[in-house]
Image (spheres, grey):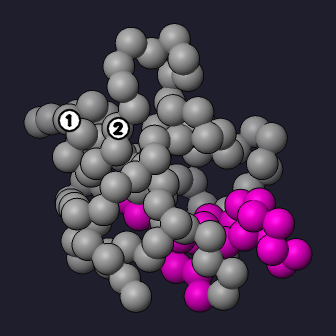
Amino acid sequence: MIFNAMTEPYEEITVCGKPALFTSIRIKRDTVPDGLYAYDVRHDDECRGIPCEVAPFVMVSHWGTIILAEPLELPDDGRRYIDEDTDWNYTPFGGTEKNQKPCVTVKEFIKTYVKQK
């Protein structure tokens, strides 16, 4: 099943030094608002729950979906392998020093991280 990006709850995390929303479900891409970027995350082949790859779409070993306010740099093959120690952090962007509660909806994320024109 795939779900509407605007109706699901998320966990704010940090991916490759950028604020991101994470959910363990598949998000229907045409429900992601313009100006946001969605990627699927693949977990390790041993099923230990370790995020290991980010790509526009992951069919097998889907770990979840991330949404960012800016695109990730992906190699020519369209897949970025994740170093769990440096690229993936379950702490919200800015860590505990941030004086705001973590975003849990796409609307909150847009308000906090998307630059309005």
Q: Quadrant of residue 74?
A: bottom right
Q: Is residue 54 magenta?
A: yes
Dot 1 and dot 2 residues touching (CB under 8 Å): no
For badge 1, the amino acid type reads Lys
User: Considering only vertical position in the picture, is 35 above or below 111?
Assistant: below
Q: Earlier in the sequence, mark 1 or mark 2?
A: 2
Q: Residue 27: image x %, image y %?
A: 37, 73
Q: Which mark is residue 103?
A: 2
What residue is shown at x 40% (from left), y 88% (from top)? 1
The answer to whether any part of residue 63 appears in the image is yes
Q: Quadrant of residue 113?
A: top left
Q: Which mark is residue 111?
A: 1
Which stretch appears magenta?
37-59
Q: Single out the mark in the foreground, 1 or 2.
A: 2
Q: Is residue 90 magenta?
A: no
Q: Residue 72: image x %, image y %?
A: 52, 53
Q: Residue 83: image x %, image y %?
A: 79, 50
Distance from label 1 to label 2 (Cα)? Answer: 9 Å
What residue is shown at x 75% (from left), y 64% (from top)? 49
User: Considering only vertical position in the picture, is 21 above or below 26?
Assistant: above
The answer to whether any part of residue 114 appears in the image is no
What residue is shown at x 48% (from left), y 54% (from top)? 22
For badge 2, the amino acid type reads Cys
The reply, left or right, for residue 97 in relation to residue 46 is left
